[in-house]
Image (tube, rainbow, N blue to C red):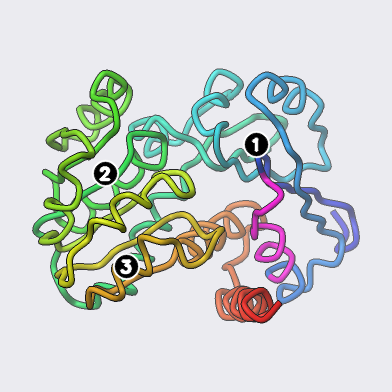
Amino acid sequence: MSARAVRRAAVLGHPVAHSLSPLLHRAAYAALGLEGWEYGRHDVTEESLPGFVAALDETWAGLSLTMPLKQAVLPLLDSVDPLAEVVGAVNTLLLSARLRVGVNTDVHGVVAALREGLGSRPVRTAVVLGAGATAASSLAALAELGCTAPRVLVRSLARTGDLRSAAHRMGVTPSFERLDRAVERVATADAVVSTMPRYAADPIAQGLGDRVDGVLLDVVYDPRPTALSRAWAAACGTVVGGERMLLHQAAEQVRLMTGSDAPLAAMDGALEAELAARATA
């Protein structure tokens, strides 16, 4: 394939207008000199996903998938990477020889983002807020960082079946509790990963005391900072914004889709410039 042959990729989700994925991938293509590569954004629901995937042709290199598609895509795939299969969530669809391959780069993103905040500190205790697909990836990431028995705090214990199954496949043993204990639990944890939707963690922020011990990764990056991130920083905790997870998982997607190592510095520079522009807008 010539350097100028069209290759397409895109982020899919609902809603998706806020996504910074196009910025990151386009910055990577520019730095790599991939002139024929395009990266778009499409608002796709669970109901419309099968039709979108069926229409993909040989010009497509892959898709980035955000909520609510990370589990809905599973029946549409020809094969699933072992990590994604264990986690039960796919955030990356690769097109290879007309095969649809599902991969999970969220685990890589969570690990890399938390390491930015942790430095050399170990993770002995951890809390995950939420029970969706990103929570499953967070359990795998925390296990990689050394914590195989985190607490998972959820609104409804009755809706944790998929996450419990994923944890069993991973060989991790989280405990599950209701969110009304969140303030007490997060305050002393080495690492906290909030996978809750925008504004859903605001009540926790309101109840947070004046001292926390660990690192918070809030995967929400719009709005930025979240109320939980602000309260965490005010309580002398270390905050890692959700855009850091996005950066690192996108870098892994770039590597998988293009076959080239991602130009992380270029992607990071584009991300910081965009966030600075938004902050002053």
Element type where label 2 sits in the image: helix
Residue type pointed to by label 2? Leu
Q: Residue at x 48, y 55 (%)?
A: 220
Secondary-structure class at tag 1: loop
Q: Amino acid at mark 1?
A: His
Of 17 and 267, nearer the camera is: 17
Is 80 placed left or right of 121 in the picture?
right
The amino acid beneath tag 3 is Ala
**Residue 17 highlighted magenta (yes or no):** yes
Q: CA distance from mark 1 to mark 3?
A: 28 Å
Measuring 83% from the left and 42% from the top, which residue is drawn there? Answer: 59
For discs 3 and 2, the disc positioned in front in the rendered view: 3
* Residue 58 at x, y percent in the picture: 81, 37
Residue range in magenta is 16-27
> Which quadrant of the figure has residue 46?
top right
Q: Residue at x 35, y 60 (%)?
A: 228
